[in-house]
Image: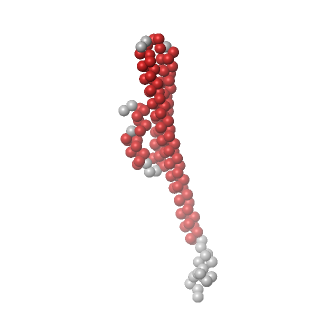
């Protein structure tokens, strides 16, 4: 499998499906960002090679156009792989942030709710007729 196919391979799809914690999603984010940087580097190398083939096509004779076409196609594949990888990294970063945001306030609500119960006053515990529960 080539590196540009690594953006969407079965093991990464499975890891993405199994990601449950913010840490899982952040690890996937880091992986996709590293892969995107690598794909962008490869695309730049192909662009430089394409520039060379266009400037010095007389060195390559009949093969010049084939080399240019092949190099251009690789460059486009690498650019697309980088874009896809960055989109996936953004998705996993947002998912991790959403999970962290969801988990952090939930812990605070539990503490606030438990504290409210322990600080209940007799006025809070009054019955429907204004009587304190237990009095008649």
Image: 82 above or below 136: above
Locate residue 21, reporting x and y percent: 46, 50
Image: 24 above or below 72: below
Residue 115 position by quadrant? bottom right
Closer to us: 64 or 24: 64
* Residue displayed at 50% across by 26% down: 44
Quarter of the image with the N terminus in it: top left
Asked whether residue 38 appears in the rendered view, the answer is: no
Residue 5 position by quadrant? top left
Image: 21 above or below 7: below
Image position of 10 (left or right of 47): left
* Residue displayed at 51% across by 19% down: 51
Residue 69 position by quadrant? top left
Asked whether residue 91 appears in the rendered view, the answer is: yes
Locate residue 53, reporting x and y percent: 48, 17
Closer to us: 120 or 4: 4
Image position of 2 (left or right of 134): left
**Residue that lies at the very extreme toward the bottom in this rendered image:** 136
Locate residue 19, reporting x and y percent: 43, 48
The chosen color scheme is secondary structure
Locate residue 89, reporting x and y percent: 49, 41
Closer to us: 56 or 112: 56
* Residue displayed at 40% across by 48% down: 18
* Residue displayed at 49% across by 45% down: 92
Image: 68 above or below 95: above
Quarter of the image with the C terminus in it: bottom right
Label tally: 0
């Amino acid at each position: 499998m080539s590196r540009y196919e690594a953006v969407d391979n079965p093991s990464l799809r499975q890891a993405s499906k199994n990601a449950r914690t913010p840490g899982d999603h952040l690890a996937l984010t880091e992986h996709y960002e590293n892969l995107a940087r690598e794909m962008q580097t490869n695309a730049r190398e192909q662009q430089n090679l394409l520039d060379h083939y266009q400037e010095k096509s007389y060195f390559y004779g009949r093969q010049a156009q084939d080399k240019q076409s092949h190099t251009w196609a690789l460059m486009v594949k690498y650019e697309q792989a980088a874009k896809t990888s960055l989109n996936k990294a953004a998705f996993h970063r947002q998912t991790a942030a959403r999970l962290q945001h969801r988990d952090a306030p939930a812990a605070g609500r539990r503490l606030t709710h438990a504290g409210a119960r322990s600080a209940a006053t007799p006025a809070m515990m009054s019955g429907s007729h204004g009587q304190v529960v237990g009095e008649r």
